[in-house]
Amino acid sequence: MPGRLITFEGTEGSGKTTQISLLAERLRAQGHPVRTLREPGGTAIGEEIRHTLKHSPANHAMTPEAELLLMNASRAQLVREVIRPALAAGQIVLCDRYYDSTIAYQGYGRQLDLRMVQSLIEVAVGGTRPDLTLVFVVPQEVSEARRRVRQPTLPLSLKRDRFEEADRAFFDRVAQGYQALAAAEPGRVRLLDATGKVADIQAAIWDLVQPLLPGKGRPAG
Ligand code: Z5A
């Protein structure tokens, strides 16, 4: 039986990683085979690309087009090396970001041509599309506050992050991008208020994931 691909989206610090690990735990406790991944990254090649994109001292000069290509290079590797085999083996793949991030960040945030962004995504993923995409929505102040709490615990090599250096207008455009994606594909892309308590968000996610689980059939839409 083919697996399921569930992707998690939103701005940084919106709580994706926290909820992915809680969901993975719950699914495993019920006997489901689960694979958790992150983008950019998730393979040896992808993790090298991630370092270049986020933390390399040389990345100040990176152009939006180079960023777009690197995101999709990491993704093309991840899809073929990990995601497709995992889905073929019947696993539930939980991915921290996927191509909707590219539409939101490189398309809306960096304001690259959306048709060009879509065509590169097509090269990277082909038909490997998510069954469900959860977009964690938090106001920028919440995102910033959560990042500040986490910052002191990071190793020195990870403290500088090129994406965190973008201005507020950039993150406003990213948020608009996610709203547009949800409006365009309401069956797949679900907006989630992620400002509440961890347990409440966990329950809301479970309500959306449960119908997709193997043996439960798929929801309409
Ligand atoms: N990017 C891109 O531009 N284009 C692309 O195609 C792709 C990515 C794939 C990846 O960063 C960057 O790459 C990202 C977009 C860009 N940059 N930005 N901005 P990343 O992988 O390092 O990080 P992230 O995905 O943006 O998120 P994150 O920093 O890992 O945060 P998170 O996973 O959403 O949140 P968290 O770690 O679960 O929680 C953050 C803190 O809040 C932590 O201390 C938690 O304990 C706390 N937390 C979590 N939930 C709650 C609740 N409910 N209440 C209170 N506190 C909470």
Image: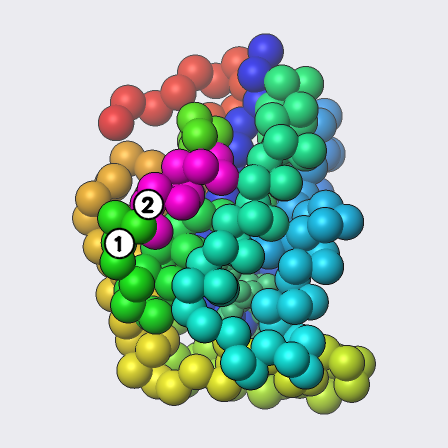
Q: Amino acid at mark 2?
A: Gln
Which residue has dot 2 on it?
Answer: 118
User: With respect to residue 67, does 95 lie above or below?
Assistant: above
Which residue has dot 1 on it?
Answer: 114
> Is residue 14 among the parts visible in the rendering?
no
For label 2, count other residues whose C-alpha is less than 10 Å away and answer few (under 14), some (14-19) or many (20+): some
Residue 54: give x, y in percent of width and height: 61, 72
Q: Secondary structure at mark 1?
A: helix
Q: Which residues are magenta?
A: 117-125
User: With respect to residue 91, does 58 lie above or below?
Assistant: below
Q: Secondary structure at mark 2?
A: helix
Cα distance between the residues tagged 1 and 2 = 6 Å
Q: Amino acid at mark 1?
A: Leu
Q: Main secondary structure of the magenta part?
A: helix
Contact, CB < 8 Å: mark 1 with mark 2? yes
* In front of the other: 35 or 111: 111
Ligand 1 - quadrant of the structure image: bottom right
Q: Quadrant of the N terminus?
A: top right
Residue 76: give x, y in percent of width and height: 56, 40
Residue 3: give x, y in percent of width and height: 58, 22
> Is residue 74 among the parts visible in the rendering?
yes
Residue 24 sits inside the magenta stretch: no
Q: Which image quadrant is residue 53 in? A: bottom right
